[in-house]
Image (cartoon, rainbow, N blue to C red):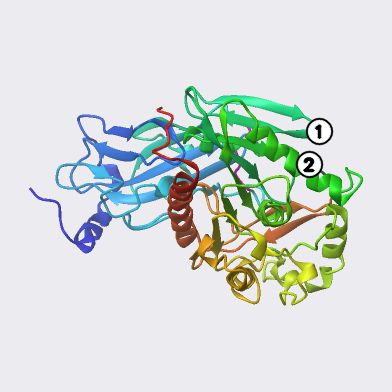
Amino acid sequence: MTRPSSPVLLFARLLRPSSTMSPAVPPVLSVVPSRALVDETFRVTVQNLPPGSAVTLHSLHRSEDEDMWEAFGHYVSDQGGSVSVSDDFCFGGTYTGKEAMGLLWSMRPVPGSREGLRLRKRDVCTPQLVHISVYGGHAEQGFAARPPLASVLSERWFMGPGVRRVEVKEKGARGTLFIPPGPGPFPGVLDMWGGGGGLLEYRSALLASHGYASLALEYVNPGELESADMEFKYFETAFNIVRLHPLVSPDRVGFFGLCLGSIMTNYLAAESTAIKPRCCVCVSGVHLYPRGAAFTEVYQAITLKAHKVRLDENNHEIWRYRELPIPGDLSGKVDVGRINCPMLLVNGLDDQNLPTVEAAEDVSMARMMRAAGNDHLLTRIEYPAAGHLIEPPYSPHFRATKFIKQNREKVTLLWGGRTKPHSDAQEDSWKKILAFLQQHLYANNPPRAKM
């Protein structure tokens, strides 16, 4: 028999009680591939179910901080007794519709978890382990208290086979360099995260899995170096560590920045006379950085704008208004008209942390590059209902999370975005970022780690 064509017909079967499910042959759950990079899709299927059975597909992940994350979707088996997450309609849960990767991107902390959590991989040498299970009936909670019909363990990796991880403590710079498998030489990337500080390696590990030697840079702390000039040279030193590596093509090195890292990308590409990036990727960033200022001065200036911070109905802090209106004085922002390499800007239109859209559109980035005759180098991608934290694909959406400010005060920041459109933006932007890097850093197709 054929699969019913209308979700309404399937929905009528939901009245079947799950207790009637007692198949003679146990259900078979499969996840293919069970071991993959985090930006790869998988297929989740269930077979050997009674026709028209209501079931719940559930994913569960224990983070490195021992927090539990889950997602689930409600399905009804077809006349052949099977369910395909990629092909079948999900009627409810943490996502709805035909969503092949909904069991990953719609993950959220289990009920009763700490507030303001953010899921980030610290140890990229180990996989994210995701338990996929199928339960009888349409469950909303209590998964831990009931046995599943079947379960499968899925491994999601940031670092593919053969990628080398090298700790860097050279000429004062600190970070981790990830080198793709093979003899090289490879294009290089200086990877800079945002203002939260610390060393985050997972994006660089994933870039290396796609054929780019990527240095995840640990930021200097405010006041650690003696002057703005020394801070500026810190980033130049890091860029040259990548460029001069024997397995890197020295004329094919670019920047990749998010938030503060994106600001520094603009600053370095425009102002440095010592380094010349081949291209730049700026995610959720602006060009608002006073010329010649040190980190300490920038943070002090931000502190003085604390009165412009707004609160939402949940008392989450909204920081985007600190930098509005966009200053007309050029001394308060990077002269991006001096950038002379291809640049990709990726912004969410619901960014509640930085005024990225205003900065890109107003009297600033686009117009400044146009006035300098460099607007042909600028590519802008904007996503409605996407927020600030645009991560690699299938990562959970974090609308608001805990954040530790420079004075060690803990607050909850509103990043923005809605889960489904934000997740779509993460998937689409990653494909476009990889295509941009390939166009400007590779002469041919880059090698890719095989799981």
Q: Are marks 2 and 1 in contact (CB under 8 Å)?
A: yes
Q: Is residue 330 above or below residue 397?
A: below
Residue in the foreground of this view, choosing between 290 and 249: 249
Q: Secondary structure at mark 1?
A: loop
Q: Is residue 63 visible?
A: no
Q: Residue 120 colored magenta?
A: yes
Q: Residue 274 colored magenta?
A: no
> Residue at coordinates 80% horizontally, 69% vertically from top-left?
331
Q: Secondary structure at mark 2?
A: helix
Residue kind at label 2, given as amino acid type:
Tyr
> Residue at coordinates 69% horizontally, 45% vertically from top-left?
275
Residue in the foreground of this view, choosing between 126 and 168: 168
Question: In which quarter of the view is residue 237 placed?
Answer: top right
The mark nearer the N terminus, 2 or 1, is: 1
**Mark 2 Cα within 10 Å, few/some/many (few <14, many 20+)?**
some
Residue linked to disc 2: 234
> Residue at coordinates 65% horizontally, 31% vertically from top-left?
244
Distance from the alpha carbon under mark 2 to that under mark 1: 7 Å
Q: Is residue 102 above or below residue 310?
A: above
Q: How many marks?
A: 2
On screen, residue 228 versus residue 398, left or right, reads: right
Residue linked to disc 1: 172
Q: Position of residue 447 (x, y in %)?
A: 42, 32
Residue kind at label 1, given as amino acid type:
Gly
Residue numbers of the magenta segment:
118-122
